[in-house]
Each structure stands twice: as structure tokens, then as C-alpha cells.
């Protein structure tokens, strides 16, 4: 049974470096520990458990994998494998599907073998990179934005916020567009299409005027692109009036979408900027211009840190910095909001939504699909972990679909929309759902009581026995305690009381 909460959390393997050519693998002749650890990291525990042999080899082994680790003894590989055997394997009700047929879908009517594409960026910027990504199992690539401008990038050009494991949570870039010539990029398209006729090539383009938008769209079609994505959303352009400057002006979005549509017969998607209060006006303008679909989100204008000694923000380029685009898992909630709003907009009904913003795991991707995404694009997770994340994206989603009885991923598109309202006025307000404390799991840290006292309604007493006690008269059911508990020992109670 696929669970919302994994048995093994990333925190349990916080010291795992997710190595290339992992030494733990070389040290083990019975399992593929690195593959198992990756599956756990990317929340595909069930897929990991499914590839374990019947008998647990770790029970009679002194864990040479842990000694071979690049951080010897710091990753409890054997314990993690045993937990997969004890707690995940027995609960797996559905065997892993024999094929990936249920992942097949389409982008504006053109077949996709699965919903996952590289999004336009450095991860899809050369022939070799796309070739390797296709080999790894990606359904297609939205190529790094092509333009006729002379692009010179700054160095360094990235900054990041990281979590306790050192992994990137949010990522800032100040990069512009492809620095290859249009002719070089067209040759790449021709070669890719020749070798990979069934993979989807989405050509991201940016023009400076109507003629340039049209010319680039036509060239991309002539050289094998399956569809064109119009970059109305790069926030990092050195030249004013381009990228997200266009995406913020619906009239320009309409005019340039129409130019691209007139110039080619392949589907045209408008990639919209999140640097607006609402994407509705730009989305509707793209539709008026003839767009067949929308892509979102591009990166969010941001500052990721100010050096306390030099006072310069990150990344510092010769003592100066600039606002730059934020991406990665941290932006997912904002991206989900924009996708849901586009999907719920009746004026945009029928347009394909290519969704992105912070997808790392198959669960992230599924959330976008449930809120209307018809395809999923990814950059930052690939920059951090490599093309190999496709293994768990596909396996995890395939298992979920099989377990839920879906024949096709298409059946899941938009299923969450009816439960989401743009405003809170529609919500029921007469029921209070109390927290329930699991006394076995509780270690008596008292964090729930601290948060309830200083950030809640003073409803939790913390006695000498170091166990929380709820005062039902004061509790408003806000669930702050559930969220702060480091032990996950608090859950919503089945007991609800009606107010008034
Ligand atoms: C380094 C970098 C370069 C990017 N370059 C482009 C680009 O050339 N064209 C474009 O449309 N989006 C570009 N993007 C935005 C991504 O395609 C994507 O919209 C955004 O990063 C959100 O997805 P993610 O969180 O999976 O990275 C870039 C993003 C990054 C991090």
C-alpha cells in the first residue's frame, strides 16, 4: 500500500551522498544498495522493496557496504534495508507493473512515452546531454531557449539554500539563454530527431520582435521540433523588454504568440512568468493568440542571501549581484497554485498544461498532474541529482497508478481540482478536529507544548511525566502541534466536536 508518509525518511539517510559509482554497490554482491538508497531518497520505497530478493541477505552479513561508504559507518544501510523488508515489503499489495504502458500520454495530441521532460535550461542544452537523458528514459526535452542574440553569461551564476543534509532546497540562477548559434541548435534538433524519432523535442525560443518569433518557430519546425515553447518568462535577461517583461504584458503575449502560430503548424505553448499576481491574463492572451498549451512556472525573482561582511548578495559577480530566478523544491507550492489556477480558469479549458516548479519525486509530479498538469518538466532536481532520477519518477508513478487501478496517467489529470478553492470562504467552519497523541511514539520533548503556548492557544499542558495533555476547552484544532512534532507522534483525532 503506497503511503503518504514514508517508513524511511530522508533524515534517516541524511549522510548518504547518493554517490556516482557508489562504493557500497561494489562492496555488496547480493543487493544493489545504491539503487535502493536512491529509491528511498526519491520516495519510491515500494519500488525499492519490490526489487529485494525473498530472503534478507543483510541478516547474515556484517555490512561491508557501510564500511566501503565514502562516509564510512555514517549511513545505516543495513538497518534501512531491514526496514524495507520488515515494514514495506509485507504491505506491498500490488506487484510492480510489467510494463510502462499506463505512463503513456500526450502533449497537444503528440505521443509521450511518459509525462516527464527535461525543462528548458542547461540540462537540455547539447546533443550529448539530450542523448543521454533519452537513453536514461526521459520522454523528451524542452531545449535550452534558442535566440539570435549574443549571450554572455556571468560567473558565478548560481546560489542555493540548502537543508541539513546539504541538499539544495531552493536554487537561484542569473542565467540567460542558449549561447549556441541558432544554426548549431538546429543541427542538434536534426541529429536528435534522427536518432530518437519517438522522443519529444520541445523547442524553447525567444525573439525580440514579431518577425524573429516567427522565424525561430518556423526554423524549429523545419528542423524536427515536435512543438514550440515561447519563453515569455526568463527573469534574467540583460536586455530590457524581453522574457518576463513580455510575460507581464498580455498584449505582447498575444501578439508574439500569434506571430509564432502564423509561422508554423506544430503546437505552440506559451511559457508564463510567475512574477505576476495572476497568470490568468497572460494565459488568456496566449489563447487569443492561438496557443495550444501553456507551460509554467518559470523561475521566481528572488534574492538568496546577503553576505554579512561584504554586503553583496549571492551569487556575487565581481562584488555585485542581481535579482535572479528561484527554482527547486522550495517553489513547488507556488507553482502548484499557478497550475491549479490555470486549470480552473474556464477561459483556458482544453489547453495543454505543461507543469513544472520544484519536482523531485514522483509524488511531486503526481501533485501537479492531479491539479491539471498534462506533462511534467524538470530542471533543478536534474541539476542536483542527474538524469538518473527518471528511474524513480517512472517506477513510483507507475506503481501508484497500478495500485489505484488507473489504466492511464491521463485519468489522473485534474482529479484534485474540485477539492481546491481559490478563496477560503467556501470552507466549513463548525468542526474542530483535535490532535491525538501517540504515547508510545512520544519521546517527551515538549515541542508541541512550547509551540502551542507561544504560537497557538495554550491548550497543551506538559507535566512532570514529560507527556503532553490536551485541554479540549482551549484547543481550536489548528494542528500546529502535529506539524512541529519531531517524532511525528501526533495525528488528527477521529473525535471531532461541533462548535457552538
Ligand atoms: C540554471 C537554469 C537555467 C534556466 N534556463 C531557462 C531557459 O533558458 N529557458 C526557460 O524557459 N527556462 C529556463 N529555466 C527555468 C526552468 O526551465 C524551470 O521553468 C524552472 O527552473 C522551474 O523548474 P524546476 O524547479 O524543476 O527547476 C532555467 C532554470 C535554471 C535553474
Image (cartoon, helix red, strand yellow):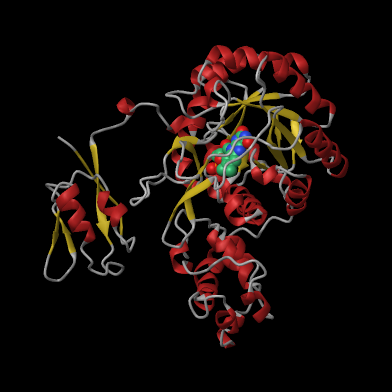
Q: Which quadrant of the figure has residue 136?
A: bottom right
Foreground residue, 186 or 420?
186
Quadrant occupied by the C terminus? top left
Q: x, y (%) of residue 10? A: 47, 62
Taking 243 as reference, is 263 above or below it?
above
In the rendering, at what x and y percent does residue 188 appear? 81, 39
Question: Residue 50: x, y in percent?
Answer: 63, 65
The image shows residue 437, relative to residue 331, as above or below, that is below
Query: Residue at horizontal 61%, vertical 58%?
Result: 94
Q: Residue at x 57, y 58 (%)?
A: 44
Horizontal relation, residue 321 to residue 434: left or right: right
> Front-most of 102 and 211?
211
| Whole-percent x, y for residue 394 in the image | 65, 51
- Asked if one can make out residue 159 in the rendered structure from this viewpoint, the answer is yes
Instruction: From the viewer's side, name the closer residue of 13 and 400.
Output: 13
Q: Is residue 108 above or below residue 499?
A: above
Total count of labels: 0
Q: Is residue 144 above or below residue 12?
A: above
Residue found at x 49% / y 48%: 159
Q: Is residue 212 left or right of residue 414?
A: right
Q: Does residue 49 appear anywhere in the picture?
A: no
| Left or right of 306, for residue 45 | right
Depth check, front residue: 38 or 223: 223
Amino acid at each position: 500500500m503506497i503511503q503518504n508518509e514514508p517508513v524511511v525518511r530522508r533524515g534517516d539517510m541524511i549522510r548518504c551522498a547518493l554517490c556516482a559509482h557508489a562504493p557500497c554497490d561494489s562492496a555488496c554482491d547480493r543487493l544493489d544498495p545504491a539503487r535502493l538508497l536512491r529509491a528511498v531518497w526519491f520516495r519510491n520505497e515500494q519500488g525499492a522493496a519490490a526489487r529485494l530478493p525473498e530472503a534478507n541477505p543483510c541478516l547474515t552479513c556484517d555490512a561491508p557496504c557501510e564500511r566501503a561508504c565514502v562516509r564510512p559507518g555514517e549511513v545505516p544501510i543495513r538497518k534501512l534495508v531491514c526496514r524495507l523488508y520488515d515494514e514495506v515489503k509485507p504491505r506491498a499489495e500490488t506487484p510492480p507493473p510489467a510494463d510502462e504502458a499506463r505512463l503513456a500520454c500526450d502533449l497537444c495530441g503528440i505521443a509521450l512515452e511518459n509525462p516527464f521532460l527535461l525543462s528548458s535550461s542547461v540540462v537540455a542544452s547539447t546533443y550529448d546531454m539530450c542523448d543521454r537523458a533519452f537513453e536514461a528514459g526521459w520522454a523528451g526535452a524542452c531545449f535550452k531557449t534558442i535566440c539570435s542574440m549574443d549571450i554572455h553569461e556571468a560567473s558565478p551564476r548560481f546560489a542555493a539554500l540548502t537543508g541539513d543534509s546539504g541538499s539544495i532546497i531552493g536554487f537561484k540562477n542569473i542565467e540567460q539563454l542558449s549561447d549556441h548559434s541558432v544554426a548549431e541548435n538546429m543541427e542538434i534538433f536534426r541529429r536528435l530527431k534522427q536518432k530518437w524519432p519517438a522522443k519529444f523535442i520541445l523547442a524553447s525560443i525567444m525573439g525580440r520582435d514579431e518577425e524573429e518569433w516567427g522565424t525561430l518557430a518556423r526554423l524549429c519546425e523545419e528542423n524536427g521540433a515536435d512543438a514550440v515553447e515561447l519563453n515569455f518568462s526568463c527573469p534574467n535577461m540583460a536586455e530590457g523588454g524581453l522574457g518576463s517583461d513580455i510575460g507581464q504584458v498580455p498584449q505582447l503575449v498575444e501578439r508574439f504568440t500569434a506571430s509564432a502560430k502564423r509561422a508554423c503548424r506544430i503546437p505552440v505553448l506559451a511559457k508564463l512568468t510567475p512574477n505576476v499576481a495572476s497568470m490568468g491574463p497572460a494565459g488568456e492572451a496566449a489563447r487569443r493568440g492561438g496557443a495550444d498549451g501553456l507551460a509554467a512556472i518559470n523561475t521566481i525573482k528572488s534574492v538568496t542571501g546577503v553576505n554579512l561582511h561584504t554586503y553583496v548578495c549571492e551569487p556575487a559577480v565581481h562584488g555585485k549581484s542581481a535579482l535572479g530566478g528561484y527554482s527547486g523544491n522550495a517553489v513547488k507550492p507556488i507553482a502548484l497554485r499557478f497550475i491549479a489556477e490555470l486549470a480552473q480558469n474556464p477561459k483556458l479549458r482544453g489547453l495543454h498544461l505543461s507543469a513544472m516548479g520544484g519536482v523531485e519525486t514522483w509524488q511531486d509530479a503526481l501533485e501537479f498532474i492531479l491539479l491539471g498538469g498534462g506533462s511534467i518538466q524538470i530542471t533543478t532536481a536534474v541539476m542536483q541529482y542527474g538524469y538518473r532520477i527518471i528511474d524513480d519518477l517512472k517506477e513510483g508513478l507507475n506503481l501508484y497508478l497500478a495500485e489505484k487501478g488507473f489504466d492511464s496517467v491521463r485519468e489522473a489529470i485534474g482529479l484534485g481540482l474540485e477539492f481546491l478553492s481559490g478563496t477560503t470562504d467556501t470552507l466549513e467552519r463548525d468542526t474542530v478536529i483535535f490532535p491525538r497523541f501517540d504515547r508510545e511514539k512520544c519521546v517527551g520533548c515538549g515541542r508541541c507544548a512550547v509551540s502551542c503556548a507561544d504560537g497557538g492557544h495554550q491548550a497543551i499542558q506538559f507535566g512532570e511525566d514529560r507527556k503532553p495533555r490536551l485541554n479540549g476547552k482551549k484547543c481550536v484544532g489548528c494542528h500546529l502541534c502535529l506539524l512541529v512534532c519531531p517524532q511525528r507522534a501526533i495525528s488528527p483525532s477521529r473525535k471531532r466536536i461541533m462548535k457552538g
